[in-house]
Image: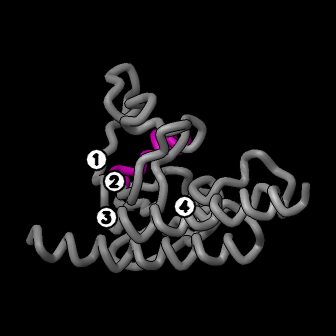
């Protein structure tokens, strides 16, 4: 059973990584997310903050909104969220509030992560919902995409001086 789950996690994270690459083509920070319900991807999104000029247009929030519309409910029970980077406080709050029971993410965000790097919102017993967390699925691949994006961004800024 555990091997099957790991294989499924890997496959769904590849889908989230494909979303991250879509963000990159828009000059967005390459973060992607998918939401799975009963073995089917019901939502997929990538960062759109720059394109939409919306500070809340994170991949996770866009996917959560889409999944709620598909299911016709704000309660995303029996869903798993796959995201290429550890969620921030805003996104982790939305995950908790939407009752997503399972979060799978690839790599940590030491500057804004709310699932272990800076905060551990999923462990806060004051919330009425618990989230199972799986960390590290496709860590290297997702880290490489982010690292390369920021390396190229620094080079472009340096060349523009």
**Mark 3 or mark 1, which is nearer the start of the sequence?**
1
- The residue range painted magenta reads 92-103
Report which quarter residue 65 is drawn in.
Answer: bottom right
In this view of the protein, can residue 69 be seen by the observer?
A: no
Q: Are marks 4 and 2 in contact (CB under 8 Å)?
A: no
Q: Could you give the CA–CA distance between mark 3 and mark 2, rounded to whole angstroms?
A: 13 Å
Say if mark 3 contacts mark 4, CB within 8 Å: no
- Residue shown at the point (52%, 65%) measured from the top left: 33
Q: Secondary structure at mark 1?
A: strand
Of the 4 image quadrants, the one containing the N terminus is bottom left
- Location of mark 1 (residue): 132
Spatial distance from mark 4 to mark 2, Cα to Cα? 26 Å
User: Residue 127 at what x, y percent from top left?
Assistant: 40, 26
- Gap in Å between the C-alphas at discs 1 and 3? 14 Å
Asked whether the residues under the numbered discs 2 and 1 touch, taking CB atoms below 8 Å apart as contact, a structural biologist would say: yes
Q: Which residue is mark 2?
A: 102
Check residue 41 for magenta coloring.
Answer: no
Residue behind mark 3: 137
Q: Quadrant of the C terminus?
A: bottom right
Q: Secondary structure at mark 4?
A: helix
Task: Please name the residue that numbered disc 4 is placed on.
Answer: 147
């Amino acid at each position: 059973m555990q091997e099957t789950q790991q294989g499924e996690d890997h496959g769904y994270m590849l889908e989230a990584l494909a979303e991250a690459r879509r963000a990159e083509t828009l000059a967005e920070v390459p973060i992607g997310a998918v939401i799975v319900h009963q073995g089917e991807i019901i939502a997929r999104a990538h960062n759109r903050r720059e394109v939409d000029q919306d500070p809340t247009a994170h991949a996770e929030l866009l996917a959560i909104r889409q999944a709620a519309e598909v299911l016709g409910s704000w309660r995303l029970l029996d869903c798993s969220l796959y995201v290429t980077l550890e969620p921030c406080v805003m996104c982790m709050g939305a995950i908790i509030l939407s009752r997503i029971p399972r979060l799978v993410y690839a790599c940590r965000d030491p500057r804004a992560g709310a699932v272990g790097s800076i905060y551990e919102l999923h462990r806060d017993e004051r919330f009425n919902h618990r989230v199972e967390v799986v960390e590290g699925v496709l860590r290297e691949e997702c880290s490489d995409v982010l690292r390369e994006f920021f390396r190229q961004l620094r080079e472009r800024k340096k060349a523009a001086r």
